[in-house]
Amino acid sequence: MTTVRLGRYIYGLGGIAYGITTLVWHQIDSLGNFSHPEFLVYLAGIFELVGGVAIQWQRTARFGALTLSAVFSIFALHWISQIVKTPVVFGPWGNFGEQFSIVAGGVIVFASTIRSIPKRATTIEIAAYGCFGLCVISYALYQLFYLTYTAGLVPTWIPPGQMFWAIATTVAFALAGIALLSGLSALLASQLLTIMLILFGLLVWLPPAFTDPQKMSNWTEFAATLAMAASSWIVADFLSQPNIFPRRWPFVHFPAKQEES
């Protein structure tokens, strides 16, 4: 049975950031332009805050992980209806992938708290891990289909150019997803992915949030990127534990870590 380390705490901060933006702006930005009753907005914000705080302590981590996973699952399921309406438009697919990758991180944290039923916990962890890998592939496709928009997000002061970094990060997402799903250098891929997502948050979304603090999307995009980075961090923590994947996943054998005699 594995334990999730620092990634869990960053995940909680992501939930808290989501909750604050939801309550301050009275809007659930993760649902796009979907109209919703005001009481649902407050309910979502409160659950995000409570879940983000609860996950910080071991005794309440299970409750916090379940709460945040449930909230982000609702956000993800909302995009399913949009996918059905416009299946050839990749935007809803990409939004679903982002939200579901956050769900996967919370599910792994939840599984890490079920110490009395290790087989079930392992099954949940591996399923969530696989879903996260697929979501990372969706990150790459999202950027590929909206490459010009992605390039526009890159700060102009970073050499050698905006389009270069748009293409480079798209390739990096694709390679990370392939590594996670194949098992080849999965731990390294998750660690590098975490670093890249953190840099996205710090370089792309945090500066606009301070220069234009009244714009909600700047803060929600930062919160989303923080939560996505935390999920990747949780996956990296998960993969760094001994005896991960004692069988093939799905093509490559992960050897169990040998204990020192």
Image (tube, rainbow, N blue to C red):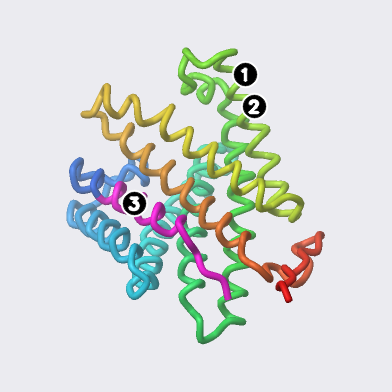
Give SS at disc 3: helix
Q: Residue at x 40, y 44 (%)?
A: 224
Distance from label 3 to label 2 (Cα)?
28 Å
Q: Residues within 10 Å of mark 2 (few under 14, many from 20)?
A: few
Q: Quadrant of the C terminus?
A: bottom right
Location of mark 2 (residue): 168
Quadrant the N terminus occupies: bottom right
Which residue is label 1 attached to?
Answer: 164
Three-letter amino acid code at the position of disc 3 = Leu
Residue contact at pointers 1 and 3, CB within 8 angstroms: no
Residue under pointer 3: 13
Q: Nearer the viewer, mark 1 or mark 3?
A: 3
Residue range in magenta is: 1-19
**Residue, x 54% and y 50% (percent of image)?**
232
Find residue 240 and report its image quarter: bottom right
The amino acid type of the residue labelled 2 equals Ala
Q: Residue 4: horizontal and vertical position, in percent? A: 50, 64
Residue 9 lies within the magenta run: yes
> Would residue 39 be counted in the magenta stretch?
no
Q: Main secondary structure of the magenta part?
A: helix
- Residue 57, disc: none
Q: Secondary structure at mark 1?
A: helix
Where is residue 188 shown, x and y percent of the image? 66, 47
Q: Earlier in the sequence, mark 3 or mark 2?
A: 3
Three-letter residue code for mark 1: Phe
The secondary element bearing badge 2 is classed as helix
Q: CA distance from mark 1 to mark 3?
A: 31 Å
**Looking at the image, which residue is at 50% across and 48% down?**
96
